[in-house]
Image: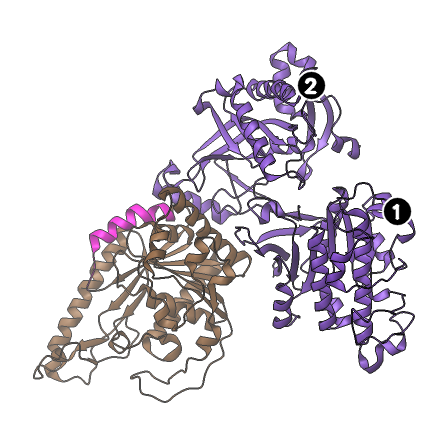
Chain colours: A brown, B purple
């Protein structure tokens, strides 16, 4: 049975697209037929991960000018081309050979042209009725990916917040991942959204989970690790290569950095308390906590870490997430 | 001219006489489409020619065993260019390379297969020329544009060769009469398939044949379908052939869990606005094609897909799948319990329908201006009927259907019937003294049942559901001036007033689409209706 997963957040910049793209690639690598859809219609960014220019867009399908086969690109060959590096620590390690992907990955991209965005808002026609036609086509898209293309997983990258297309994307999904970025939590907004929107979906069978992103504990700023050094902005040193869930200061650290490290630990603990309270409050389990990895975060170009650096703790965290999803799916 | 599925392929529902290239993979249904096109033509009284280099006459007859034999004999020709037993003398003007005394017999000689080819170049041109001349001769007998005695214009296109032809390879040539009724008949041609012709005769001969034939067919304003299997044909050849045709119909074949999905679309057509969207179709047991008819089958209220399996019913709505039902509930949860704000149907009402169309309005011999006039007159006449204009706007819904209209009356079951009788009285007066061409013939179907009220894409109020579908199907059974009724409405009326008992009479239990059986009633008196049983009923029983 196909599973439709939507990544959503209250605010933008929480890492939805990164997580969705990496999870999709990993599931394809594990042998599934995966369809990744960019429904972040107001600010689509999925293309950055694949560097492909589609001939037709999801917008064309929604507008009724293209069929489903026209708007999904088979990117399995492209992800097979990704060269994996043997890396657990840095990005400059020995190159591994290419890996055969046993599943399939199709991606549907969304156009960022303002005319196309305007059309999705019902522009060009009586708004309500045009929008319902678009919604019907969107639901048909999911149906056809399942019935005509035998999808195992449909992964949707949605727009943040409570907007027409994010609500629609959540409505068609059976599994909802509410992504939160640590350090930039909007507890009240997230709680309100969860209560008002997610409740309607879970009442009719959808499952919802929290995905914590950029959890503290993997990196600490250099000025904290070495108090004598001036403060180079955005510069960081790695202090641990753990899963990101249970980061702790390594024993080799100098005594001068222990105190700042414990400050970091304290911040992390506080964040954990906050998110646990939120999770309990809105009755969502935390399905994954992904640490803040500066080596990925500040790369010049987006890439699929799970393929390029499969030994990286970020990729390992996705292995766990994929296993959890498979487990949920097998129970369904 | 109608081609199979045209009402689904084109919004307008008709296309001008055209030469159409039908492309698609092997097994997509191209041949079955051609057979349907051919059979429809015979049923419509058109003259039809079937050209195939891979069929025998016997096979041809078997394929059209559903057509009355006399009709097939008198109104069709079958030609297999490969099986010509004909001298190829005097073909120099068609193909200068042909020697004066080419092989006297047919193409099945060993010489024809010399060098690994199925037929040599000279015979290719020659046999296709003979085919062309044969088609020309046949058309000359049934159309006003070509005459055997004066075929200069056509000969300019195909080479002015004074060859007399026998019809040895015609399925029914000995029976073909010299006079086939009027000499201005619609003509349908099937060439199935170009792919096989190309294999047998080679590219240059077939391209010339198709080009020459196209001029001939344009002269007689024929509608023709030529099939081509792609992707096995080269892109160059496909483009070269496409340039000859007025339009392209494309088919596709997809495998899925439950079998094969066949779809067809009008890929291009010169001079017409169209939306080239795929229409699914099935080849049913008797070999005919069934197109997904959005307007007369159950659709998922959420995704709009035509429901092929068991529909899922909930809250009076119909869904294609459990997933659609759940999505609907989720959306209702977010947008509010009354989800009309996003345009989904919020109301189910019981409506009494009057469904009518003008008989033979799509007759190609009827000028478009005349068609428009008739529609305008019908609209005015309906608008002047008491039952219509005395019903408040919010108690009725009016849907135009191109060559007719559907009117739903929300409360009073008598109104559709009253409108029918009032309209017939007006029509009888109007038709008095009119020529056949100017007469307006209507068929009317009445039925009642639940429908969903929705706003369509143009924000017009629209309805769909069992009520309106039933009325349309009932109307489809009738002929000119029939007022036919589905059982529920008829029985309601009969129970309501005694006068209806004398005018609304049961005809037969009739099986409509999807195996549903209804008791069919016909309403008639001296002033309205048609006392004869509908021809479809007569044919069926």
B175 vs A148, left or right, is: right
Query: Label 2 neighbourhood size at 10 Å, few (<14), some (14-19), many (20+)?
Result: many
> Secondary structure of the magenta portion, mostly?
helix
Residue at 90% x, 59% y is: B168
Q: In this picture, which residue range is highlighted in magenta?
A: A183-202
Q: Mark 2: which secondary structure?
A: loop
CA distance for labels 1 and 2: 42 Å
Identify the residue position indicated by label 1 in the image: B177
Where, quadrant-wise, is the C terminus of chain B in this rendering? top right
Query: Residue B365: where, in percent of width, then height?
Result: 68, 40
Of badges 1 and 2, nearer the viewer stands 1
Magenta span contains residue B87: no
Identify the residue position indicated by label 2 in the image: B524
Which of pointers 1 and 2 lies earlier in the amino acid sequence? 1
Query: Residue A56: where, in percent of width, then height?
Result: 45, 63
Query: Residue A230: where, in percent of width, then height?
Result: 8, 82
Confirm whether residue B287 shows in the render.
no
Residue at 32% x, 54% y is: A284
| Letter of the chain that mark 2 sits on in the rendering | B
| Letter of the chain that mark 1 sits on in the rendering | B
Q: Nearer the viewer, residue B33 or B307?
A: B33
């Amino acid at each position: 049975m196909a599973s439709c997963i939507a990544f959503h957040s209250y605010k933008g910049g929480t890492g939805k697209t990164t997580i969705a793209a990496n999870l999709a690639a990993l599931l394809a690598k594990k042998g599934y037929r995966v369809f990744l859809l960019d429904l972040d219609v107001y600010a689509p960014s999925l293309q950055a991960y694949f560097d492909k220019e589609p001939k037709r867009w999801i917008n064309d399908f929604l507008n009724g000018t293209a069929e489903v086969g026209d708007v999904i690109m088979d990117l399995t060959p492209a992800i097979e081309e990704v060269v994996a590096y043997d890396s657990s620590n840095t990005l400059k390690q020995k190159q591994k050979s290419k890996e055969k992907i046993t599943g399939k990955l199709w991606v549907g991209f969304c156009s960022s042209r303002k005319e196309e965005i305007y059309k999705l808002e019902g522009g060009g026609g009586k708004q309500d009725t045009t929008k319902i036609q678009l919604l019907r086509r969107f639901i048909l898209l999911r149906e056809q990916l399942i019935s005509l293309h035998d999808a195992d997983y449909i992964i949707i990258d949605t727009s943040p917040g409570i907007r027409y297309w994010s609500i629609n994307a959540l409505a068609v999904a059976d599994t909802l991942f509410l992504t939160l970025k640590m350090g930039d939590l909007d507890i009240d907004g997230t709680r309100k959204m969860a209560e008002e929107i997610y409740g309607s979906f879970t009442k009719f069978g959808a499952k919802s989970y929290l995905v914590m992103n950029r959890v503290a504990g993997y990196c600490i700023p250099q000025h904290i690790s070495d108090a004598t050094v001036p403060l180079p902005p955005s510069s960081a040193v790695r202090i641990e290569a753990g899963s990101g869930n249970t980061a702790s200061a390594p024993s080799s650290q100098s005594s001068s950095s222990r105190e700042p490290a414990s400050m970091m630990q304290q911040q992390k603990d506080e964040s954990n308390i906050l998110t646990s309270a939120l999770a309990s409050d809105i009755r969502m389990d935390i399905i994954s906590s992904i640490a803040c990895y500066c080596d990925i975060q500040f790369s010049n170009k987006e890439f699929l870490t799970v393929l390029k650096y499969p030994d990286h703790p970020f990729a390992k965290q996705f292995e766990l997430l994929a296993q959890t999803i498979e487990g949920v799916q097998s129970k369904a | 001219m109608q081609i199979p599925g045209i009402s689904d392929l084109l919004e307008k529902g008709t296309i001008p006489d055209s030469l159409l290239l039908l492309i698609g993979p092997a097994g997509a249904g191209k041949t079955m489409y051609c057979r349907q096109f051919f059979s429809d033509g015979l049923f419509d009284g058109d003259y039809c020619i079937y050209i195939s280099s891979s069929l025998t006459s016997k096979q041809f007859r078997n394929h059209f065993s559903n057509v009355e034999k006399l009709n097939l004999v008198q109104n069709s020709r079958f030609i297999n260019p490969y099986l010509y037993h004909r001298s190829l003398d005097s073909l120099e003007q068609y193909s200068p390379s042909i020697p004066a005394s080419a092989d006297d017999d047919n193409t099945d000689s060993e010489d024809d297969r010399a060098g690994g080819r199925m037929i040599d170049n000279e015979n290719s041109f020659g046999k296709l020329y003979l085919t062309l001349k044969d088609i020309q001769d046949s058309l000359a007998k049934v159309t006003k544009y070509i005459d055997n005695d004066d075929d200069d214009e056509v000969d300019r296109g195909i080479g002015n060769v004074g060859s007399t032809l026998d019809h040895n390879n015609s399925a029914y040539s000995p029976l073909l009469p010299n006079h086939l009724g009027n000499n201005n008949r619609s003509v349908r041609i099937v060439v199935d398939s170009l792919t096989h012709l190309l294999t047998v005769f080679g590219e240059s001969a077939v391209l010339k044949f198709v080009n020459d034939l196209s001029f001939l067919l344009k002269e007689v304003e024929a509608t023709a379908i030529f099939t081509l299997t792609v992707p096995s044909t080269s892109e160059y050849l496909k483009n070269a052939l496409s340039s000859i045709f007025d339009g392209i119909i494309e088919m596709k074949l997809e495998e899925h869990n439950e079998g094969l999905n066949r779809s067809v679309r009008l890929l291009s057509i010169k001079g017409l606005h169209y939306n080239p969207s795929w229409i699914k179709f099935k080849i049913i047991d008797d070999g005919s094609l069934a197109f997904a008819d959005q307007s007369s089958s159950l659709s998922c209220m959420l995704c709009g897909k035509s429901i092929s399996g068991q529909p899922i019913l909930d809250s009076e709505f119909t869904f294609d799948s459990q997933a659609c039902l759940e999505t609907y509930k989720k959306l209702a949860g977010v947008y509010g319990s009354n989800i009309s704000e996003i345009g989904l149907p919020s109301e189910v009402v019981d409506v009494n329908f009057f469904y009518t169309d003008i008989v033979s309005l799509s007759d190609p011999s009827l000028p478009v201006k005349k068609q428009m006039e008739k529609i305008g007159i019908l609209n005015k006449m309906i608008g002047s009927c008491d039952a219509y204009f005395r019903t408040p706007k919010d108690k009725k819904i009016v849907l135009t259907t191109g060559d007719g209209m559907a009117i739903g009356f929300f409360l009073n079951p008598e109104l559709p019937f009253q409108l029918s009788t009032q309209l017939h009285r007006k029509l009888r007066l109007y038709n008095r003294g009119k020529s056949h061409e100017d007469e307006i013939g209507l068929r009317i179907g009445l039925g009642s049942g639940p429908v969903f009220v929705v706003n369509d894409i143009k924000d017009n109020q629209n309805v769909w559901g069992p009520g309106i579908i039933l009325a349309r199907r009932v109307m489809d059974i009738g002929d000119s001036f029939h007022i036919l009724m589905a059982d529920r409405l008829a029985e309601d009326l009969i129970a309501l007033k005694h006068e209806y008992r004398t005018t609304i009479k049961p005809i037969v239990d009739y099986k409509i689409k999807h195996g549903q059986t209804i008791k069919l009633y016909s309403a008639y008196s001296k002033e309205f209706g048609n006392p004869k049983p509908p021809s479809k009923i007569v044919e069926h029983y």
